[in-house]
Image (cartoon, coloured by chain):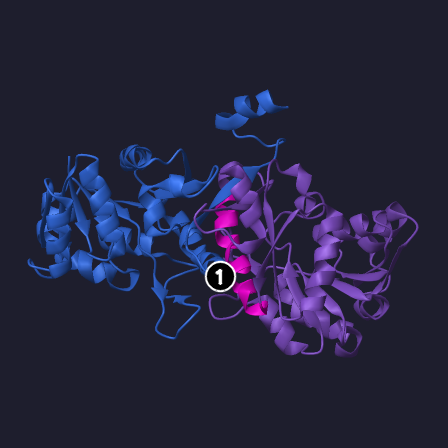
Chain colours: A blue, B purple
Amino acid sequence: MKIGVLGTGTVGITLGTKLVELGYQVKMGSRTPDNEKAAEWVKRAGEGASQGTFADAASFGEVLFNCTGGGVSIEALKLAGAQNLKGKTLVDVANTLDFSKGMPPTLTVLNTDSLGEQIQREFPEAKVVKTLNTVAAPIMVDPKLVQGDHDVFMSGDDPQAKGQVQRILREFGWRNVIDLGDISTARGTEMWLALWVRLMMGFQSPMFNVHIQRSLDAPDPATASRLRGQR
Amino acid sequence: MKIGVLGTGTVGITLGTKLVELGYQVKMGSRTPDNEKAAEWVKRAGEGASQGTFADAASFGEVLFNCTGGGVSIEALKLAGAQNLKGKTLVDVANTLDFSKGMPPTLTVLNTDSLGEQIQREFPEAKVVKTLNTVAAPIMVDPKLVQGDHDVFMSGDDPQAKGQVQRILREFGWRNVIDLGDISTARGTEMWLALWVRLMMGFQSPMFNVHIQRSLDAPDPATASRLRGQR
């Protein structure tokens, strides 16, 4: 399958590298067709890796990853072109953290809206799935870096797109994928960043994640049998 | 030790009941000295339980719990009286969730401020410690209701007050208390409610909590020896 990765930062490089390793053909998109970071990545990642503009990558990919900074994602996706997003699964892993006033950063979209919803509204024919935005880039593609059970969340309106993303997440190694519901639930995972940032500052490391622990009295159907076994 | 519990809702009743069980003398405060819910609670909780106005409870307690709704906490604490909060540990367990526009609720204070900070600014001579606001009331006083390891957070400017609160949390049964830092870190735990609400809606139950899982490569000093033992 062909995948377009939009953005040449740490997140785009990390996801693009892993997707090539998994056997996908990956085109990394940026504002210019000859972006230096993308060119270096193409050399390193080897066969299956290519580069181009945002529009080139979006046109190329059957599934797209938005790895641009949250503050410029809408602009970058407009450069990618609505016609190139149409009908495609668009995995949004971005956050709107604003570091311009120092630490801790604040969020520029929150509470009654989220970046995931903004993207879905702006590109109604794309199938936006918000995920992976709650963990640092190395953990996104290698959850075993964090010990024990821990979880990744998924928000989106299209069940088939979420199924497609879930299969990719499992290829990355994710065992616990929590489907929160429609794209408006991205507010929850984007606002989690406020606590994530404070934990990161305290730990002096971004290498952590959350695990949701449940009550034995309130198992969901999926875990009920496992929990009964533990009683 | 004498404790003042401000608020007669589920959280105040739950905390008050547990604190009486633990042997504390607890006065529950409300707007009026003869609040019916408080009166019922006094009968049920038995010896060690009493009731009064916000000012009565604040004057009585050496440690105070703010269990009023986040939207009215500042007003309730003004009724309690700044002179009655002076020099005391004020445990703030409230959230500013606004359900007036239906589900999901929004937060009325966030991003660049928090209720914890607002209270600390309004009552600079109180020692505000934000904690327990990330879990449902039954879990606050009985963390064993949730299976496995899971965590409670603590934010505050005064180390001694945090030590005092940590001892009470341990009496409640909390094994993992994560000290996030100064009171501004309450922004993180208050904003966590946005994700908490979506999980609660998905699980159809508030009986869950988070556990922070770390990388083996980045242990903090407190957990380093335990982690080495697991390698």
Q: Residue B84 appears in which quarter of the rendering?
A: bottom right
Q: Position of residue A182 (x, y in %)?
A: 37, 43
Picture residue at 36% right of the left edge, 44% below the top: A155
Q: Badge 1 is on which residue?
A: A198
Q: Position of residue B209 (x, y in %)?
A: 57, 44
Front residue of A174/A110: it is A174
What residue type is disc 1 on?
Arg
Q: Residue B38 appears in which quarter of the rendering?
A: bottom right
Picture residue at 29% right of the left edge, 37% below the top: A165
Q: For this view, does A58 lie left or right of residue B178?
A: left
Where, quadrant-wise, is the N terminus of chain A in this rendering?
top left
Q: Is residue B112 above or below residue A173?
A: below
Front residue of A155/A43: it is A43
In the structure shown, which secondary structural element does the residue marked by tag 1 occupy? helix
**Helix, strand or loop: magenta stretch:** helix
- For the image, the number of numbered tags is 1
Q: For this view, does B35 lie left or right of residue B173?
A: right
Q: Is residue B196 magenta?
A: yes
Picture residue at 8% right of the left edge, 51% below the top: A56
Report the residue that reaches farthest toward the right.
B47
Q: Position of residue B217 (x, y in %)?
A: 43, 48
Q: For this view, does A189 lie left or right of residue B150?
A: left
* Subunit ID for the residue under disc 1: A
Q: Is residue A108 above or below residue B207?
A: below
Q: Position of residue A55 (x, y in %)?
A: 10, 53
Where, quadrant-wise, is the C terminus of chain A in this rendering?
top right
Q: Is residue A79 above or below residue A140?
A: below
Q: What span is colored magenta in the figure?
A: B182-199
Picture residue at 79% right of the left edge, 53% below the top: B16
| Residue count near mark 1 (Cα–Cα under 10 Å), binned few <14, some 14–19, many ≥20 | many
Q: Is residue A146 visible in the rendered structure shown here?
A: yes
Q: For this view, does B227 lie left or right of residue A33?
A: right
